[in-house]
Image (cartoon, helix red, strand yellow):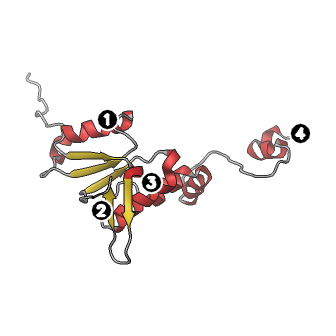
Amino acid sequence: MSRLREPDLPPPWASHTVAAAVRLTVLSRSLSVPSTARLVAAARARGHTVRVLDPVQVEMHLDGTRGQLLYRRRKLALPDVVLPRIAQSITAYGLAVVNQFGMLGVPVMNTAEAIAHSRNKMRCLQLLSAHGIAVPATVMATSKLPNSPRIDMLAPSRRAP
């Protein structure tokens, strides 16, 4: 009795090949950051053109019309897509740079708003909860009152008799 065998199928990612190389800009403090280096290697292995720009070195010029970006005092050619990897230490300026790319019509993989939300843990929990996604019981407060009542809010079964 012969066995039926599955035909040899290409791997799932084979059908998702890109027809043309993409000009990708990674906004990162340095190519030596391991996650940045890995992203760059993966993109280049797939035939894309990649450049890493330190967001701190990007200058934004606004003139009431379209504006422009410069990198180390040279006009920056706009990429096909931007992948922000904004360090916590430069969040404010980095997000302004991400916004500027977006305002110039360049698709940005993570918008400045999304990055800002991800940096604010309570806001992140609020957004998840608002969309029906379960979050761990959380209490946030700025008062210097004792924590016992807050702990009771998190674990009602621990309340004293």
Residue projecting furthest to the top? 1
Q: CA distance from mark 4 to mark 2?
A: 57 Å
Q: Which quadrant would the C terminus be assigned to in this image?
A: top right
Tag 1: residue type? Arg
Tag 3: residue type? Gly
Find disc 4 in the rendering and name its residue: 160
Q: Position of residue 150 (x, y in %)?
A: 79, 46
Q: Position of residue 36 (x, y in %)?
A: 35, 39
Above/below status of 62 relative to 113: below
Q: Describe residue 57's horizontal placement relative to residue 132 as left or right.
A: left
Tag 4: residue type? Ala
Say few, some or many: other residues with alpha carbon within 10 Å of mark 4 (under 14 / 14 to 19 / 20 or more): few
Q: First in sequence, mark 1 or 2: give its number.
A: 1
Q: CA distance from mark 2 to mark 3?
A: 16 Å
Q: First in sequence, mark 2 or 3: give its number.
A: 3
Tag 2: residue type? Val
Find disc 3 in the rendering and name its residue: 94
Q: Nearer the viewer, mark 4 or mark 2?
A: 2
Q: First in sequence, mark 4 or 1: give its number.
A: 1
Say few, some or many: other residues with alpha carbon within 10 Å of mark 2 (under 14 / 14 to 19 / 20 or more): some
Q: First in sequence, mark 1 or 3: give its number.
A: 1
Find disc 2 in the rendering and name its residue: 106
User: In the image shown, does 71 or 34 lie closer to the viewer?
Assistant: 71
Q: CA distance from mark 4 to mark 1?
A: 52 Å
Mark 3 secondary-structure assignment: helix
User: In the image shown, does 111 or 57 lie closer to the viewer?
Assistant: 57
Residue at x 36%, y 68% (from the top left corner): 103
Mark 1 secondary-structure assignment: helix
Find disc 1 in the rendering and name its residue: 38
